[in-house]
Image (cartoon, helix red, strand yellow):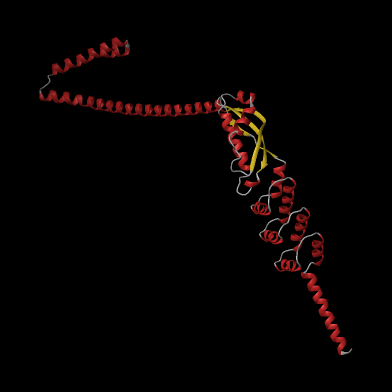
């Protein structure tokens, strides 16, 4: 094998490697598709996407859709939105839908809505075709104490201008629920609510509940009204039960105090009896001292004993106790 043959083989190998690198770095097929689709994209732009680790197909295909729809988007802006983590396909589809529905929406607004975490395509669709939000069962109590369960259907339309920073469906449901509770609570009886459920819709709708939200409320319809518990009667029953327990507690307290006072009085009586017994035990000693000292004569002592016997007999006769009468006579 000659030197020229070896040199030619090396050159051929280098050319093959170069072509492989070029085909890898430059998606020629995608460039050709974009060129014949009217998308102005340079080969250097595709190479730059490769270097920035951006899949060119993710940028070029949405650009082709936008171009065919008659929108002149800037490929740099589209790539920038992709690098920011946005959904380029959803933004382009939303722009096309908005254009067909004659809704004013530019790329910057759509990209901002997408980066805010909202589904921009769904928002445009809801702007064209309003959606219905059904609330859960809302418990409200009329002035007569009867609980009413209300289910409402809220028809809303997306407000493109307030999608960024506007409150979502949860806020709409919470505000509608608050309005229903307030309206039912101002009704004198639950019968008024059952007879005129449209009053709830009218009053709630007049409150401007969509203020600061990403939606515009078109209508509020009461889907179902059910009568539930008698909250007023239940509260009265609970109050009566509480009053009963309080009264029982106070009665128990008074009973305990009475028992304690009775025990104190019994202790005092026992103490008095003890003092009487003690005093009675001192009587014989006092008589003996009186006799010894001459302060009491023997005749006076017998007179005292006769007086005691007479007194005991009178008490026995008054009480009708025969045994005591016999003892007194002895």
Please tell me which residue lies in front, 243 or 122: 122
Please tell me which residue lies in front, 69 or 152: 69
Residue extending furthest toward the bottom? 2
Left/right placement of residue 166 relative to residue 319 reads right
Question: Could you tell me residue 173's position as x and y percent?
Answer: 62, 39
Name above or below for residue 42 compared with residue 298: below
Q: Please state the total of marks drawn on the protein image.
A: 0
Please tell me which residue lies in front, 31 or 291: 31
- Is residue 330 visible in this depiction of the protein? no
- Residue depicted at x 32% and y 13%: 323
Question: Could you tell me residue 2's position as x and y percent?
Answer: 88, 90
Give the position of the C terminus as an image quadrant: top left
- Is residue 246 visible in this depiction of the protein? yes
- Residue depicted at x 79% and y 65%: 31
Which corner quadrant of the image does residue 137 belong to?
A: top right
Residue extending furthest toward the right? 1
Left/right placement of residue 298 relative to residue 22 reads left
Which corner quadrant of the image does residue 329 belong to?
A: top left
């Amino acid at each position: 094998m000659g030197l020229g043959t070896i040199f030619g083989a090396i050159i051929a190998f280098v050319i093959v490697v170069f072509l492989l690198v070029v085909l890898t770095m430059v998606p020629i097929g995608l460039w050709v598709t974009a060129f014949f689709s009217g998308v102005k994209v340079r080969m250097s732009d595709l190479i730059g996407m490769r270097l920035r680790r951006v899949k060119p197909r993710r940028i070029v295909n949405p650009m082709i859709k936008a171009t065919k729809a008659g929108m002149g988007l800037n490929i740099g802006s589209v790539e920038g939105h992709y690098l920011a983590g946005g959904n380029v396909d959803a933004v382009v589809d939303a722009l096309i839908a908005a254009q067909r529905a004659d809704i004013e929406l530019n790329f910057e607004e759509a990209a901002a809505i997408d980066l805010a975490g909202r589904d921009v395509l769904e928002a445009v669709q809801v702007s064209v075709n309003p959606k219905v939000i059904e609330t859960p069962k809302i418990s409200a109590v009329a002035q007569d104490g009867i609980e009413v369960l209300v289910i409402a259907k809220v028809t809303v339309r997306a407000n493109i201008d307030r999608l960024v920073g506007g409150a979502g469906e949860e806020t709409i449901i919470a505000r509608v629920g608050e309005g229903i509770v307030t309206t039912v609570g101002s009704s004198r009886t639950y019968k008024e609510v059952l007879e005129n459920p449209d009053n709830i819709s009218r009053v709630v709708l007049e409150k401007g509940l969509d203020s600061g939200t990403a939606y515009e409320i078109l209508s509020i319809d009461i889907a179902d009204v059910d009568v539930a518990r008698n909250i007023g009667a239940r509260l009265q029953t609970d109050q009566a039960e509480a009053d009963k327990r309080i009264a029982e507690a106070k009665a128990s307290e008074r009973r305990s105090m009475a028992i304690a006072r009775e025990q104190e009085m019994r202790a005092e009586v026992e103490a008095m009896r003890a003092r009487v017994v003690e005093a009675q035990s001192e009587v014989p000693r006092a008589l003996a001292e009186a006799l010894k000292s001459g302060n009491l004569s023997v005749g006076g002592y017998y007179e005292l004993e006769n007086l005691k016997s007479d007194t005991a007999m009178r008490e026995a006769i008054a009480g009708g106790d025969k045994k005591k009468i016999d003892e007194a006579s002895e």
